[in-house]
Image (spheres, coloured by chain):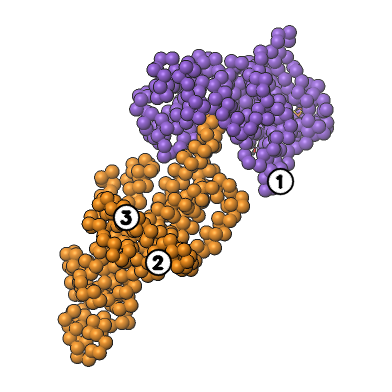
Chain colours: A purple, B orange
Amino acid sequence: MTLDPPPAVLEVEELSLAIDTDEGRAGILDRASVKLAAGSIHGVVGESGCGKSTLLKAILGVLPKRSRILGGDIRLGQRSLLGLSPEAMQREVRGRAIGFIPQDPFQALNPVFRVDTQLMEPLAAHGFRPDDGLAPEDGGSMRGHLVSLLKAVQLPDAEQALRRYPHQFSGGQRQRLLIAAALACAPRIVLADEPTTALDVTTQLQILKLLHNLARQRRLSMIFVTHDFGVVAQLCDEVTVMYAGQTVESGPVRDVLDSPRHPYTRLLLACHPARQGELAGIPGSVPSALQPPSGCRFHPRCPQARLQCGAAPPSRVQVGAGREVACVLYGGAAE
Amino acid sequence: MGRFILRRMLFVVPSLLGLLVLTFVMLRVLPNDPSAALAGENATPAQIAAVRTAYGFDQPIWKQFAVYLKQVVHADLGTSIVTGRPVVADIALRLPATIELTFCALLFASAMGIPIGTLAAVWHNSVFDHAMRIVTVGGLAIAAFWFAIILQLVFSMSLDWLPLRGRISVGMPEPAPVTRLLLVDSLLAGRLGVFRDALLHLVMPALTLSLGGLASIARFTRAGVLDTLQKDFVGYAEAAGYRRSRIIWVYVLRNSVVAATTQIGLLFGALISSAVAVESIFDWPGIGSYAVKAILTSDYKAILAVTLVVGVIYAIVNIVVDIVHALLDPRVAESL
Ligand SMILES: Nc1ncnc2c1ncn2[C@@H]1O[C@H](COP(=O)(O)OP(=O)(O)O)[C@@H](O)[C@H]1O
Ligand code: SF4
Ligand SMILES: [Mg+2]
């Protein structure tokens, strides 16, 4: 408790966000907070539809058209990203400061362009400079840089692979290509949106191992989104649990796994004693963002809910070194 | 790729055979008696009967068809009643004019229609988008005839910038026929004056003919781009930091055009059909105006031949479209 927390390289602070739909305004995120410490792999875990992808889109500035930031902030180091122009976000953030690994490697690559064309795109967009030290072992050419990237993600026949089309690769190989693309401009931060969900189990393990090694070798800070607590246990240093657009608990992975505090986290882990597989089996379902429950959004499903839980959202309270939980049980009284 | 092309060509054979049967039968049941037309206005019934026997019109239909098939195979489509020359020769002379006209119209329609459609999709539901939809749905195609006349009134009659009709000025010596496409031949011969003259003649007919195509190309480019914009790879490209202009004008457009090649191919066929009207308005010496004359004079052999040639062009365009499709999308060539 006396230790200073490591500096955050990326921080989402109390971000509230809504999307205007034809059926009305949907409150997708409600004061969501994630703090990515330098050099750590930070899992964001929650059921499908709880706002994980939207959180990443907000960081990258690629939210759908009719979305609205209602409050909070996103900071890259000291700098707020919410004030940046779309052009600045493209030039300085996306692909440059922050690399992105998408969920579905089968859909993410453009089918009618060769791999090299697509991998060169972020490099070209951000002005590839051989003196960046991006690719020490080659002559400094863009192509050479790509080849060394493909070697780093362990794709065989790198030179030939560059000349092929996406459909000529397996799912796992495509995900390796996308990891290479995310690392092309040597970003310090990588956001991965369920990068192994579309893959079979064996391939999943290989990709996780690869990501883990790359993150350590290159001292990356990474947000890893998943609905699978098992993956969090294997890969991550820290974790933030999300439910229906709210971040309900966060802390070091070991501590959270050993002693989950939030009722939702407990249920999640209880559903899966082996800490494997998907989140399911909690009675009820994630509420629609169109009419989210008032107060703590988990209260209609919470076995320990009290009267005050639906009145106002509980605030986050510190419950240990680097641990926070938002629940009235821990004194997060309604504000 | 060679195998792919060969297979595509084999696919075309049955439809061409069907076309032969269809045109032949349709012409035989036309109310006009080709024998009467052949024999001339003042012919006696006896003379008409003689013509009928001479041309084999009294033979059973299937025999006439067999004879016709044999002639087609030998590229002998008979002699035109009107020009008195082999129709194959007539068509060989006129077809390049139509191809030149149609190709330029299609080129213009694509050069305008693709950017317009793309912008309409990118600025979805904007004023530009709505305006484009009103203009294209509002029947540019229907207005083509009036458009042609207005063009003639303004640019030929009043301003005298463009020639009113024809393909080349009277007295202008034609370049040596290599491709019979005037623009190409004049350049090959290094005759820039002729090139300019031919180009000026081409402007108004090509513009008129392109209108209908422009509207459809803009519309299906818009639909294609809207569709492609929803694709995951577009969202990924944005998140990965590609430049916005590259995403739209390279990645999205290329995918949309792949889907649109089929429609552009169909359009080429449709343009050849509309060329009939446009060629008549501008006195363009192509197979369109030839076909009109043939129909008006019941020039039986000429009508059959034109229909056949247009059918063959349709087939060729179809094959070309498939090849282009395969070149644009690597997955197509591999699937065959
Ligand atoms: N473009 C959109 N318009 C309206 N609602 C959206 C849109 N995108 C996502 N949502 C809604 O936001 C919620 C969170 O979605 P998402 O961030 O994709 O969740 P996750 O990644 O955790 O599965 C879901 O309820 C989803 O229906
Ligand atoms: S705040 Fe109330 S409803 Fe929400 S998790 Fe805690 S006890 Fe359950
Ligand atoms: Mg998601």
Mark 2: which amino acid?
Answer: Leu
- State which quarter of the image contains the N terminus of chain B: top left
Q: Which mark is residue B164?
A: 2
Q: Secondary structure at mark 3?
A: helix
Q: Are marks 2 and 3 in contact (CB under 8 Å)?
A: no
Percent from the top left, x then y, of residue A25? 71, 43
The residue carrying mark 1 has its beta carbon less than 8 Å from ligand 1: no
Q: Nearer the viewer, mark 1 or mark 3?
A: 3
Question: In terms of depth relative to the viewer, which is nearer, B125 or A8?
Answer: B125
Residue A316's place in the image compared with B47, above or below, is above
Number of other residues with Cα within 10 Å of mark 1, as a class: few under 14, some 14 to 19, many 20 or more = few
Q: Which residue is mark 1?
A: A24
Percent from the top left, x then y, of residue B328? 38, 43
Q: Which residue is mark 3?
A: B193
Q: Residue furthest top?
A: A2
Q: Quadrant of residue A264?
A: top right
